[in-house]
Every structure is written in C-alpha cells, then in structure tokens.
C-alpha cells in the first residue's frame, strides 16, 4: 500500500509497444492515473509509440523506477521480465496486465484494466516477494558473466546438430553426467515457464526451492529434480582426456559425438552469454527478490496466487478439466458457492472424476419408463 504523507505519487508504465492493444491500454492507464493526481513516467524507448502528453519521459534503465511506487506492465510475461530488470534494483513492485497468451506472471487481464487501475490509485494492493537466482559463469577461474534471473538460467547447446556434454553438481558434489540439449535451473516462479516445457514439475510459489531440469538428456538417470533453496547448483561443460600419457595426452572439450563444442547461457530468455568449452556456471538463491503487487484477495488458505489460489490459476491458464469435482462442503460455503445437493432416495450418486453420472438401471427405477 502507498504510505501516506509523502510527496506526489509516481508510477512507471511499461508496455509491449509492438502491439496496438498494448499502446491503447497504456494511454488509457496514463490518462486514468493522471486524472487521479498520480504522476506517470514512460521510458524514452516507448514514449514515441505511447504518444501520451500526460507522462514524463525518463531514460530506460534501473533509474526509471527509482522513487516510483509501482511499475505497471502491459503485455505478456516477456514484457514483465523486461520490466523486472528495471524494477528489481530499485526495489519497486511490478504489476502485470496480461495482453499476451498465457501471462502467468500477470495479475489482471485486459478486461479488468479499469478496475485494476482504480485499486492501485486507492492503494488497495499488497506486495509479495518472488525468489530469484544469482548466476555466475567462469572459465578456468576467470569470471565471464555475473547476472540473475526470475524464471530460470539455462545452459544450452550452441550448435543445433550436436548435444552438449555436462556434469551436474549439487553443493560441491558431482551428481551425474548428461549428453543433452541443455539444463534448466529454475525458481518456483519459473516452474511454469521453460522448466515446465522441458518436463519439470509445477511448484507452488510459496515453496522455496531450486529446480534442475535436463533438456532431452540421453541418459538413464535424468529426472527433473527439486533441491533446497540453500543449495548451490553448478553445470560444467565436460573436458575429456584424449591420448595416452606416453603420447602427450591432453584435456580437450567434447560434445556428444566426440567433437569440441561450447554452449550458451540464457537468463529469463533475455540475456545471452557465450560459454567456451570447459566453462562452469553456478546458480544459487538470489540476494534480491522481485516484488509483485497483487490487487486481488489472497484466497482462503495456503497456495494463494493473484486472483485466488494458485490451483485456480493453473486451471484457468491451462484449461484443466475439473468438471465433476464436488469439494468439501465447508470450503464451498466459505467461498459462497452452493454445495452439491445429495442424491435423492433411489437415485444413483454422481460418480467421481470428469465423467457424467450414468443413467439409473432398471432395478433402481422400478422397471421400464
């Protein structure tokens, strides 16, 4: 909530300006905020596309969110991940309005835009922390990159025609060696992103954990794994010893198939780093979380997420079949739903699952109709 007694409130608006509906929505948000007395910022990169005289133009970068109360993001998850790069260093909460396809990180949909803005203006929102990962890549002890991710860090093959050979390490101990297309190291927030597509588990957002998910590994043991949030993960590109000692053998990098190969590291699918053969990538819990603003209630119990329980978000986003669910009477009454009526005397009880009830048999109806 916005603390009272401060100077004029300020919010930063970030939009996917490549989409016409996002540009229109951005103008509507800016007009509604300025009419309520809230100062609005847009970045230089988006100012021309948004074309709204009521907003101040600021340079793109972490400074754009400094001192702002919120960052309002109009687009899909990719736009929100881009906005997180600006908001995270400033410790400014983000709130997303989904104009993309799935939009798992978004709090609201486009048809609820006016209501969402009104709640933000009224200060009717709460802020939750989302775990991140800090990522460091090294080559023979020399640091190649130091970065972070909200969803995941991946080590992937650099060449389409060959796999990459890696060894996975957990807390300083080797776990397994894989010939694979890559490895995903994800947060619970990222469990519904790339890790999910690679066959990883869905992890509820309040669970603190790190995920390791191989991508198309050619190995007998290559399951997706969940480890402690205090663990340190490492992915090493393998060196092989080639030639005998008498022949002046040497260490050489290999890919599956015996050819030398490097790899690439991606963070949130936005920041790419080339990894030479023999590189090592370490992933640990991030020192700085991403803050997400929520305008909907927390729901009736643990496992809540945005507009209700995280379970409801999964059902809505993936269109999961839940027809036939009866639920506990107490939970239904707490939500204001009507509990299912018990079967009448002589009527077969509904079956469990998604199949519709079967018609009663002859002896249950007293004979033919």
Image: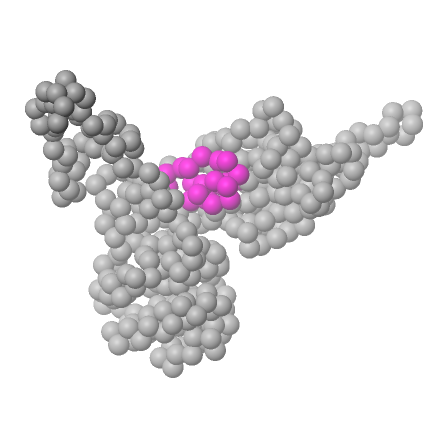
Q: Using the rendered image of the protein, determine whether residue 89 is visible from the camera's viewpoint.
A: no
Magenta stretch, residue numbers: 185-205
Residue found at x 62% / y 39%: 182
Residue found at x 90% / y 30%: 248
Q: Position of residue 187 (x, y in %)?
A: 46, 42
Q: Position of residue 132 (x, y in %)?
A: 46, 46
Residue found at x 40% / y 37%: 203
Residue found at x 58% / y 24%: 221
> Relative to the observer, which residue lies in front, 113 or 35?
113
Which quadrant, please, contains the N terminus? bottom left
Q: Position of residue 65 (x, y in %)?
A: 42, 65
Residue at the front extreme, as displayed: 368
> Relative to the observer, which residue lies in front, 198 or 284?
198
Asked if residue 357 is positioned above or below residue 83 in the image, the reply reads: above
Q: Is residue 269 left or right of residue 244?
A: left
Q: Position of residue 360 (x, y in %)?
A: 18, 24
Q: Using the rendered image of the protein, determine whether residue 336 is visible from the camera's viewpoint.
A: yes
> Relative to the observer, which residue lies in front, 204 or 327?
327
Asked if residue 9 is positioned above or below residue 357 in the image, the reply reads: below
Asked if residue 51 is positioned above or below residue 178 in the image, the reply reads: below
Q: Is residue 35 magenta?
A: no
Q: Is residue 368 left or right of residue 135?
A: left
> Relative to the observer, which residue lies in front, 141 or 350?
350
């Amino acid at each position: 909530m916005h603390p009272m007694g401060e100077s004029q409130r300020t919010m930063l608006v970030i939009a996917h300006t490549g989409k016409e509906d996002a540009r229109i929505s951005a103008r509507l948000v800016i007009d509604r905020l300025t009419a309520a007395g809230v100062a609005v910022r847009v970045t230089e990169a988006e100012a021309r596309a948004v074309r709204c005289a009521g907003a101040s133009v600021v340079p793109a970068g972490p400074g754009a969110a400094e001192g702002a109360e919120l960052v309002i993001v109009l687009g899909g998850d990719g736009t929100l991940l881009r906005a997180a790069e600006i908001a995270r260093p400033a410790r400014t909460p983000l709130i997303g309005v989904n104009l993309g396809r799935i939009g798992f990180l978004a709090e609201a949909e486009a048809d609820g835009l006016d209501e969402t803005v009104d709640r933000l203006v009224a200060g009717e929102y709460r802020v939750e922390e989302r775990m991140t990962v800090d990522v460091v890549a090294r080559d023979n002890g020399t640091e190649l990159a130091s970065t972070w991710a909200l969803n995941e860090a991946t080590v992937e093959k650099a060449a389409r025609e060959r796999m990459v050979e890696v060894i996975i390490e957990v807390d300083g101990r080797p776990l397994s060696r894989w010939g694979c297309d890559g490895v995903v190291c994800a947060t619970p927030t990222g469990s519904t992103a790339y890790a999910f597509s690679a066959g990883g588990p869905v992890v509820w957002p309040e669970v603190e954990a790190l995920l390791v998910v191989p991508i198309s590994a050619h190995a007998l043991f290559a399951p997706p794994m969940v480890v402690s949030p205090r663990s340190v993960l490492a992915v090493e590109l393998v060196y092989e010893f080639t030639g005998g000692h008498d022949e002046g053998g040497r260490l050489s990098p290999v890919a599956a198939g015996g050819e030398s190969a490097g790899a690439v590291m991606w963070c949130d699918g936005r920041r790419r780093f080339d990894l030479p053969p023999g590189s090592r990538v370490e992933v640990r819990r991030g020192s700085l979380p991403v803050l997400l603003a929520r305008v909907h209630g927390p729901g009736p119990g643990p496992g809540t997420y945005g507009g209700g329980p995280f379970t409801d978000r999964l059902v809505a986003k993936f269109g999961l079949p839940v027809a036939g669910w009866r639920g506990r009477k107490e939970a239904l009454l707490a939500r204001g739903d009507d509990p299912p009526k018990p079967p009448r005397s002589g009527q077969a009880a509904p079956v469990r699952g998604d199949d519709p009830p079967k018609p009663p048999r002859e002896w249950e109806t007293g004979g033919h109709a």
